[in-house]
């Protein structure tokens, strides 16, 4: 679905839960505006705004590729009782501002598990006026922005561990009451990520993603590589 103005797929707060599956959504202002439901196995790219916007309630994102959007996923869910978000096994890269941006405290939790985020100029995960941000088993590599940017008003119930957090160039591993350039700095500030690592993921091609995930036991890498065909495969080979 391409070229819609302003939104490729849109639901309202009164819509029943919708599942968007195995779809290609690109060159819109907002790719998908989903009030409730799930997006899975889809490619969402080249949208001038958010790839997926959640304006009302918690939704599930599973096994998708997000690239070349302003923001991969944006939550503005303001409904009381918004529930929880599940962001699992997705691949994010080449966004302009951020891979994931969380902007409200209405949801009970934002669960980010087994995602692969590689951003050359954008931030990885950005939380402002949020709460309950939970990260586990993710790969986050930034080359100019912040890997994890957790504003002072978003520290409530923040949980993070078993991630690979890596920054090169002018990138910073995180922000927590100030810039944290390394994993050690972030760990000392947050008292989280005690079992996380900081090392070059060595992305060369899809085969390497699969091999490294098998060795390290991080199934999020396998999920990311499994949805990386055809265009994403070429992208990683050219890194």
Image (spheres, grey):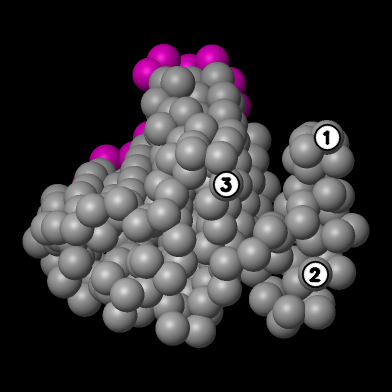
**Labels 1 and 3: the sequence-earlier one:** 3
Q: Looking at the picture, how far across and down is residue 43, in whole percent?
A: 64, 40
Q: Label 1 belongs to which residue?
A: 238
Of labels 1 and 2, earlier in sequence is 2
Residue 48 visible: yes
Q: Is residue 52 visible?
A: no
Residue 212 is marked as: 2
Query: Disc 1 on helix, strand or loop?
Result: loop
Q: The N terminus is located in which quarter?
A: top right
Q: Residues within 10 Å of mark 1 (few under 14, many from 20)?
A: few
Residue mark closest to the camera, 2 vs 3: 3
- On screen, residue 169 above or below 191: above
Report the mark closest to the observer, 1 or 3: 3
Q: Residues within 10 Å of mark 3 (few under 14, many from 20)?
A: some
The residue lying at 40 percent from left, 26 percent from top is 49
Is 149 magenta? The answer is: no
Q: Which residue is mark 3?
A: 168
Residue 38, position as x, y percentages in the image: 47, 57
Considering depth in this image, is 96 or 86 the residue closer to the camera?
A: 96
For the C terminus, give its image quadrant.
top right
Closer to the N terminus: mark 2 or mark 3?
Answer: 3
Q: State the SS at label 2.
A: helix
Find the magenta span and give its range.
1-13
In terms of depth relative to the viewer, which is nearer, 169 or 54?
Answer: 169
Q: Residue at x 85, y 41 (%)?
A: 237
Q: Position of residue 22 (x, y in %)?
A: 67, 47
Q: Are marks 1 and 2 in contact (CB under 8 Å)?
A: no
Q: Is residue 51 left or right of residue 187?
A: right
């Amino acid at each position: 679905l391409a070229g819609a103005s302003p939104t490729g797929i849109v639901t309202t707060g009164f819509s029943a839960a919708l599942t968007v599956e195995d779809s290609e959504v690109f060159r819109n202002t907002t790719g998908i505006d989903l009030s409730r439901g799930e997006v899975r196995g889809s490619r969402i790219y080249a949208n001038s705004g958010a790839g997926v916007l959640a304006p009302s309630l918690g939704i599930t994102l599973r096994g998708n590729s997000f690239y070349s959007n302003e923001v991969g996923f944006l939550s503005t869910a303001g409904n009381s009782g918004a529930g929880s978000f599940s962001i699992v096994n997705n691949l994010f890269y080449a966004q302009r501002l951020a891979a994931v941006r969380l902007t409200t405290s209405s949801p009970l939790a934002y669960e980010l598990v087994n995602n692969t985020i590689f951003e050359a100029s954008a931030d990885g995960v950005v939380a402002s006026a949020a709460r309950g941000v939970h990260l586990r088993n993710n790969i986050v590599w930034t080359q100019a922005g912040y890997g994890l940017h957790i504003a002072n008003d978003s520290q409530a119930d923040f949980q993070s561990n078993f991630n690979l957090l890596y920054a090169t160039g002018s990138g910073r591993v995180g922000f927590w009451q100030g810039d944290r350039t390394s994993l050690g700095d972030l760990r000392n500030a947050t008292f989280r990520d005690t079992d996380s690592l900081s090392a070059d993921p060595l992305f060369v091609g899809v085969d390497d993603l699969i091999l490294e995930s098998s060795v390290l036991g991080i199934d999020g890498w396998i999920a990311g590589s499994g949805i990386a065909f055809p265009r994403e495969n070429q992208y990683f080979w050219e890194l």
